[in-house]
Every structure is written in structure tokens, then in C-alpha cells.
Amino acid sequence: TYGGQHVVCFQDAPLHGVFQNLESERRMRGLKKKEGTKRPVFRYEAVGVMFMKQDVFAAGGRPVLYEHPDKARGILPREEWWRIVALNLDADPPLDWTHEREWRLLGDFEFSLGDCNVLVGNTEQYEEFVKKAGPDVLAAVAGVTVLTQVGY
């Protein structure tokens, strides 16, 4: 839910960008453990599904508008405020999510397995997915991508 409206969020990032986000999260986890601080909430895990941008667009998905919320509300009509993501580079620390290249879809995103490519982080996750998904799901999905094969 965003601003009282249900949205589905997507990241329009190339696979190497997804890999970089995951590596950053992994390093942050290691630093927090060494410093003895509480474990932070992590935004990214190496599991997901990928869709063609054209399919998201056809369903009504659009890129977000990174801007100061007050200014953004003057740019977008009220019915599209669900697309606003706060941006404030003058804040300390700066508020900047532009690296996510986010798209949003108002409401639900319906799809068939043939519309998606499954993303897993490593070979072990791939083997677990293959084992649990079974032959029918494996035959139905568009593909399975192992992220460590992209990052190394």
C-alpha cells in the first residue's frame, strides 16, 4: 500500500545492477555483525521473478517520479501520486533511491508462469528451486537465471 493505494513495485535494473545491490547488502550485513550492532532490515534478497518491461507497461505500470513530494504533487495528477518517490539530495543523509530505477503498477499484476523468468542467487538456490518446483513449473516458466553466473 502506498498513500492508501495498493501498488506493485518493480526494479528496472540490468542484472549486473541487481547483483551490485545484493553485494552491497551482503557487505552491509558483514559490517553490522563486526560492529556488534543490531542486524539492519535488508531490502534485497537474491530471489525474484523478472518480467518484460513491455508486459508491465501494457498492464499500466509506469516509472516512478523521483522528486520532492510537494513538487511532484504539482507535476502529477492526484490519481498518479502513487508514482511519487521522495528525493532530497540536500538532506543529511541524502534521500536518494534513484539507483533502484523503480516502476510501479497501481493494483495487482496478474501473469502466467510463461511470462516470468525466475531469478535465484546461486547454484544451491537453483538446485533447491528445481527440486521444489517440479517438472510442470520448470516447463512453464520462461527461464531460470542464476545471479552468480552474471556477477562473476
Image (spheres, rainbow, N blue to C red):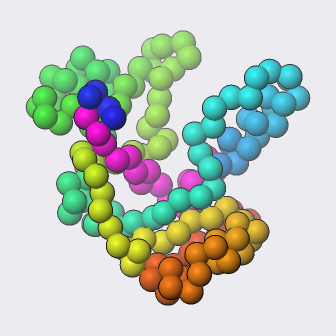
Q: Quadrant for residue 74, please give it.
A: top left
Per the rendered image, the range of residues in magenta is 5-21
Q: Which corner quadrant holds the N terminus?
A: top left
Q: Residue at (71%, 75%) from the top-left corner?
A: 127
Q: Is residue 13 magenta?
A: yes
* Of 32 and 95, the residue lying toward us: 32
Q: Position of residue 105 (x, y in %)?
A: 27, 49
Q: Residue 56 location, x and y as percent?
A: 29, 60
Counting from the top left corner in percent of width and height, residue 119 is at 56, 65
Residue shown at 53% from the left, 59% from the top: 48
Residue at position x 28%, y 27% from top?
3
Left or right: where does residue 95 sit relative to residue 3? right
Instruction: Report the side of 26 relative to 66 (left or right).
Output: right
- Taking the image as shown, residue 106 lies to the left or right of residue 49, namely left
Q: Quadrant of the C terminus?
A: bottom right
Quarter residue 43 falls in: top right
Q: Measuring 29% from the left and 62% from the top, which residue is drawn there? A: 110
**Is 73 situated above or below 102?**
above
Q: Is residue 104 magenta?
A: no
- Number of labels in the image equals 0
Q: Is residue 143 above or below residue 125?
A: below
Judge left or right: residue 81 versus residue 141. Answer: left
State whether residue 65 appears in this view.
no
Q: Is residue 48 above or below residue 41?
A: below
Above or below, 114 relative to 13: below
Do we see residue 77 in this rendering?
yes
Across and down, in percent, residue 16 comes to 59, 59
